[in-house]
Amino acid sequence: MKNINTLKNQVRLFFRKPLAKPAQAAFYLLCPILAFYLLEFLTHNPFADIHLALHMFNWFMYFLFYTCCFFLIGHMSAAFSLASFLVLAVGLINYFTLQFRGSPLLPWDVGSIATAVSVAGNQSFQITIPLAIIIAAFGALILLSLHCNLRIRASKRRLGAAAGTVMLTAILAFGLQTDAMAQTLDIYEMPFTQGYTYRQNGFLVSYLMNTKYLSVERPVSYDISALEETVAAADELFTGFIQDPLGSQAPGKDSQASAAVSSENGEFSAAGQTKKPNVIVIMNEAFSDLSVLGDLQTNKDYLPFYRSLTENTVSGTAFVSVLGGNTANSEFEFLTGDSMAFLPVGSIPYQQYIKQEIPSLVNVLSDQGYRTVAMHPYYASGWNREEVYDYLGFDEKYFLDDFQGAQRFRQYVSDWGMYQKIISLFEQKEEGQPLFLFGVTMQNHSGYSKEYDNFSNDVHVLEREYQNADTYLSLIAQSDRAYERLIRYFSQVEEPTVIVMFGDHQPTSLENQFFSDLLGKDPQLLSLEETAQRYQTPFKIWANYEIAEESDVKISVNYLSTLLMRLSGLKLSDYQDYLWNLYETLPVITANFFMDAGGTLFGYEDETIYQEQLDSYSSLQYNHLFDDRNRLMEIFILPNDEE
């Protein structure tokens, strides 16, 4: 007992004994610098990536942060312990964000916390040896902080000094957004490659620089009159093309011609039907065919039905703006016709910009008598969908609480569980009223490392063991089976029905080695053409009536709903006419690159002959999303004389 008490006294004395004053002064200077390096080492080697000027700037910014905490709290031990803990917390969030999403923590991710937390339970948080060492090093900083007894007792002086520190920090943060400081510090700025940007500049500098993208500036070329003329010119091209739902003919086409598409000339014509078709859109979570990345050998085909379904289909590649996450952005592009290309990199329109009613595909279909339904078998709060679906004009919306008893794989409602709900709503709908249903699945959401009693892998990658990849591909195989059941059901339905399915993005939270092996190189070292392969998913439009088949269509998701409307023989808004005209020149426009009709890829830093088209699109989108006082409503919804 005496030995235990002696040990307790020694421990108590150890924690109470302060460092010598010179040691505390040295620690005051060194602790912020060490915290900077520890945070950076979580994701990369800062000595290999960051040049000296930015090292020094980062030191000073961290020093200001620690000093501000000291001024606010007044006691160095508490202030530096708290500051080090906060740096560690932010560093870990950034580390796991990179692991699961493939991109670093961005300023607007703060609004996504609720969504991230809701899916975090299915992720595998692995503590590697390097990660454990860094966490332990932060623990050592906190422990040393407890031995610092420097104090500032005058509260007014402390608060005044804290205010001054905050102002200086704000000035420097604002300066980072200016060309002068960016050039002086030789800051690397390429929003498209955020992961690389964070490595070159350091986390804090890159994060602060990105705050300038929180607001969207009016395009330099923005002119209301010019926009009206641009859209009117596009509308002239298509006047009279489709007058009656599924019953009209294109000029020069046989009246019995079925809906057809040519990936070369972009010409479509409507099928000979007399009723407006039911339109069902499935945006399938992480649905993709990874064989587009390389030679993927598996024990069996994971998409047998999808590949075999060619009759009455139009299919090809849908290019998206996101990878591994931010599902809502693909959703946004499809439902609005707008593009993430003209919004801040990493932003989420559902959370940042859609705060009131805006015209959308939903309104255009509502004006043509459709009952409009949105469906997502997960929490309504995710990406703020519960509010946004109202702003987009949906009549009804269904979320996780509406799927009691539905089949689940892992902890998510399966695709078939959602499709059963679709079938139920179809069977209950008013006879003769066309249905538009937009459903976002959840089955294939990451992560893929955990084992569950209600799901087992039946697809395996050959030659090497990739547990996560096997799980992902097995889930995709289940998606294929559910899709087959859905198609077979509606193939027996008398009412004309069109079903669209496309993936929102490819996955990223598989083994890094798997992607390196599949791509044949480090995923961080891809060319623009190779990068484009990571931003494509399959799409298929199928009808339960006769249409001409077409494959290998290349299109970005912002155009996909317009393609759907044309194939269904429905009336288009002027904006959709404009988009279709633009599609014929630039069939792919994403946040990361664009492609012309000849298949040539361009980055947005490239000088091209297409700047005028991009500027017009950007201006129209700005009018649609942000200029509510001058919004050209007649462009985005059906004109009164066409309702």
Image (cartoon, rainbow, N blue to C red):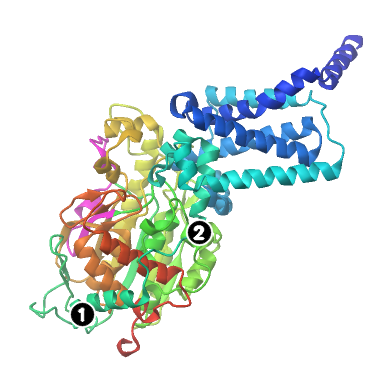
| Residue at 77 percent of width and 39 percent of height | 71
Q: Which residues are magenta?
A: 290-318
Q: Is residue 395 above or below residue 379?
A: below
Q: Secondary structure at mark 2?
A: loop
Front in this rendered view, residue 412 or 236? 236
Question: Can I make out residue 87 in this image?
Answer: yes
Characterize the local packing of mark 1: few (<14), some (14-19) or many (20 or more) Cα atoms within 10 angstroms: few
Question: Residue 371 versus residue 506: which sits nearer the camera?
Answer: 506
Q: Which callout, 2 or 1, points to the residue nearer the camera?
A: 2
Residue 78 belongs to the span the image colors magenta: no
Q: Secondary structure at mark 1?
A: helix
Q: Residue at x 44, y 24 (%)?
A: 48
Whole-percent x, y for residue 562 in the image: 28, 69
Where residue 591 sits in the image (x, y, percent)? 36, 53
Give the label on residue 342, or none.
Answer: none
Q: Give the camera-side residue of 225 and 522.
A: 225
